[in-house]
Image (spheres, grey):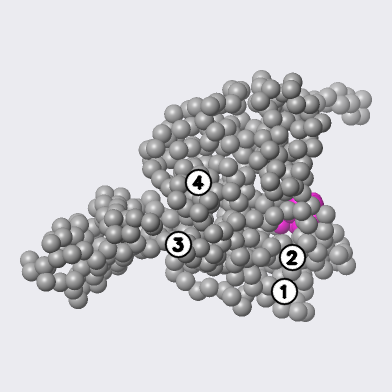
Amino acid sequence: MNLGIVPPFLLDRVAATDKPHLAHAARAAHHTLMAPREYRPHRTQLEFSVENGELVARAEPSPDRTIADAEGSETLPGKTVRTEDQPPVSDVAVNEAFDGLGQTFEFYWEVYQRDSIDGRGLALDATVHYGHDYDNAFWNGERMVFGDGDGDVFVGFTGSLTVIAHELTHGVTEASGGLDYQGQSGALNESISDVFGVLTEQYTEHQDVDRATWLIGAGILAPGIHGVALRSLKAPGTAYDDPVLGKDPQPATMAGYVQTSDDNGGVHINSGIPNHAFYLAAAAIGGYAWERAGLIWYKTVTARTLPQNADFATFADATLATAQSEYGENAKEVAAVRTAWTTVGVLSDGTQ
Amino acid sequence: MGHSDQTVVVTVVRTGGFAGIRREWRAQPEQAERDRWVTLIGQCPWDEPEAAGSSPAPDRFVWRIEARLGDDDRQAELPETELNGPWRDLVAEVQSFERERDPDR
């Protein structure tokens, strides 16, 4: 697309639309608006100011992305196909991965002043076209890896910003001390990735709590599958109901907690409970979810005070403590967080 | 070996992955195919303990494989990174068995 044909103000309008039938156009417009960044020759922006009579130069971080292509193999990293200074290539998956990494970087930097996954400018590497009909995307501790999907259930994973931000957030959690990937601590690990997955999308699309979809993985299910996404923070258990896949198994409250040895103790199932608690807190506070509810969760996760085997109640208490220190004991944010955790049955009335 | 008079059933369950969607595949081969399946099953290291000290990696698959040879039941649970060699061959056979029987899946 030529930047000169469509004026930027129009692209802004298209990019900001929440009309479902214009979603593709909105994404395209957004990508077009983002395009000039890809040609910037520097990964650090310099800002100058005068403080106490002295000239101070500040470096503003920017992402350092490298996308590789596994070409259908399971060998990592694969062949490098696009680096930070290079323009878009003909492979859509490469560009989507590149853009998604950049949008996630921007979210963490602009909202929480976190410089990349580790807070110290870690380069963002990804591999696309991993494996044959590979139905998954994951963060392996060093890079993001995307399969293409089998075409019958999944049509690829690079098209969803929530998927990319979810995966990179596993890196953030790990860099903050980690949460054991088993049982309740594993479900918290998953939930934190879902929370910042949706927040990255909401920030990028300028959506407040009412306009946001609160869905993880919208757009990656094949057309024949009966479902809108993989998970819903607003209404866990309602994302899909399909003859092949079955029904979305996520509970919204502790009454539906699933005991299982599959999936490392149901980490992708019981994450519905803390997911819904976050949604309830954010909805009660209102406005943009990343500003207050998101800040409370972010500070809780990155404080490095959570034990690796934290259970739901430990995490809930920690978010309450963060909210109190951030906003004061009697703030509405504290009440919203407390009500959210009691509504999902993690904390009982009268706690704290 | 005398396996040809035994019922052979192999069930593969995949959980986890980013999507957290459970998938299951099952094969119950005809008599003429049984010896080949018994060999496939026999090649897998069912009794070897899982790799010690490896904590589960986020969003990777977890595979549960069960084989029944007459009265002999075997079960193994493997993280995706351990699904190699004979395990991978067995899983691929079960998946293609089901695909051939039910091409719509």
Instruction: Give the residue number, with chain letter if any, for mark 4.
Output: A155
* CA gap, disc 4 and disc 1: 36 Å
User: Which chain is home to disc 3?
Assistant: A
Q: Is residue B88 above or below residue A95?
A: below
Three-letter code for the amino acid on which mark 3 is drawn: Val
Q: Which mark is residue A280?
A: 2
> Mark 2 vs mark 1: which is more N-terminal?
2
Q: In the shown orientation, is residue A91 left or right of residue B24? A: right
Q: Residues within 10 Å of mark 1 (few under 14, many from 20)?
A: some
> Mark 2 vs mark 4: which is more N-terminal?
4
Q: Nearer the viewer, residue A249 or A153?
A: A153
Disc 2 and disc 4 on one polypeptide chain: yes
The picture quadrant where one finds residue B102 is bottom left
Disc 4 and disc 3 on one polypeptide chain: yes
Q: Which mark is residue A24?
A: none
Query: What residue span does the magenta drawing correspond to?
Result: A288-297
